[in-house]
Image (cartoon, rainbow, N blue to C red):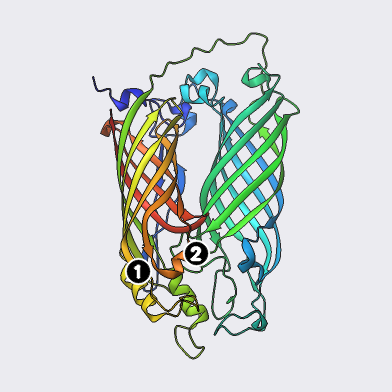
Amino acid sequence: MTRSLHSIDEGILLPSLYGRGRGWVYLLPSLTGRGRGWIFFFLLFFISKPAVAQERDSASHWSLSASASPGRLIVMGEYQRRFQKNTQTTAFAVELDYTPQPADGNPFAHDYNYPTFGFGLKLNLNDVTMHRKASDGWGMAEEVDYDSRLGNIVTAYSTFSRPVLVWPRHATLDERRVEVDYSLGAGIGYAKHKYSKNSNIDNELIGSRFLIYFTAGTHATWHVSPTWAVFGGLEYYHHSNGALNRPNKGANYWGPVVGVKYRMAPRRPTLKREKQERIGFAPYWFANIGASLGAKTLNEDWQLTQFHTPPDSARYRTGRFHMYASYNVQADVMWRYARRWATGVGVDVSYGTYADRVREIEEEGKLRPAASNKAESVSPWSLGLALKHNVYYGNLSVRMSLGWYLLRHMGSNAKEVEQPYYERIGVHYSFPQLGGLSIGASVKAHLTKADLTELTISYPFTL
């Protein structure tokens, strides 16, 4: 007998609104520029009814934190080393945090050991500079008499932090003195200084004002009093535009972080532990069929205009590039073996409308290796086989995959900048009232370098 996905996946994102609120949705702001229109996305915003309206929600769910992180830009390979100079950055963040409580009765919160959802603002003060010297050999690109800079970046983001170790070991939520967690997050950033051929010509890291943000980290928190805690850890984070414009090498950072947290209601440890009733879960197989619409600009166009175009041309080192569409169909077979997780395999079939432009560039031969006299074949079709893993919290899920191309012919430049494998990561929201239909946003990449950004709609079928 076919089971309903609605009955299996019941629950919504925030436990204080479990069964009542509207949960989380994606905000897909339209960002337009002169001569082009495009959609940028990837931040989740909380639009549920105010938590204070829920009688069972109290100040015990909420806390405030502030942190500082002296870090470094990660130099990704020999190519970037040739133009990268200063790499220092310092980040400051303020955050409003929500931690579900045992009394909320949310099975997802229980399974994740009562995680924390953060909603914050981060300011990166970047002392990051770049300069291309003529002696390093950059084709037709001429050296300029100034250093380009990354500039400061402001980011609005959300995070998910899950405790994996607590002390005392069997302490209730309010009795924990020390916690060790991992965290994941996403958001949207705004860059003050993007690439400009007139004033910031060697900034190959960031080519757009609005950026996709991703972060991951691990932290240790010490609750020094019923209301105060201090924490420290290591964090990695990333800014890029998801290949929606060029340049798009992206800025990757890492560094230590230290901070302080204030809980709005004092912790009330008690000798009597509440007995938590586990809510059962029945594992099941399901198939997932999805369709995606992606968008990208071409690395080939960037290479041509930067290094193979004479200075007297209007296209010389331009910051304006044509955007192309990509279509993708995914068919997956997944085993949901726990409330939190599902793992499986899938087939990805893609069609790129940019194949004709790549073929034209390939036939010109400017980007072919010097030893190659023959144009590589180019096909708009790609086929991949991927391992897939979904992580769930209520109706929200993070979907990750690692795939291997069975068919991929995108010219000689793709052989240089792509890998035979690809990654995809995205955030999806499902609608139980529509049988589990979900919408989401994701980024496809090669060795973390974004290839395209896409919107996806998918539907699951129990097997």
Most distant residue in the right direction: 224
- Residue 150 visible to an observer of this rendering: no
Q: Give the residue drawn at x 44%, y 59%.
A: 451
Q: Give the residue drawn at x 38%, y 38%.
A: 345
SS under mark 1: loop
* The disc label shown at residue 320, or none: none
* The disc label shown at residue 377, or none: 1
Q: Amino acid at mark 2?
A: Val
Residue 153 image point, x, y percent: 60, 59
**Count of all numbered marks drawn on residues in the image:** 2
- Relative placement, left or right, of 168 versus 333 is right
Q: Amino acid at mark 1?
A: Ser
Which of the two residues, 64 or 382, is positioned nearer the viewer here? Answer: 382
Q: Give the residue drawn at x 34%, y 45%.
A: 347
Pointer 1 or 2: first along the chain: 1
Q: Residue 146 occupies which quadrant of the picture?
A: bottom right
Within 10 Å of disc 2 (Cα), the crowding (few <14, some 14-19, many 20+) is few
- Residue 250 visible to an observer of this rendering: yes
Most distant residue in the left direction: 1
Is 80 rendered above or below residue 19?
below
Residue 371 image point, x, y percent: 49, 77
SS under mark 2: helix
Residue 365 image point, x, y percent: 42, 79
Residue that numbered label 2 is attached to: 417
Which of the two residues, 328 or 13, is positioned nearer the viewer here? Answer: 328
Q: Residue 125 occupies which quadrant of the picture?
A: bottom right
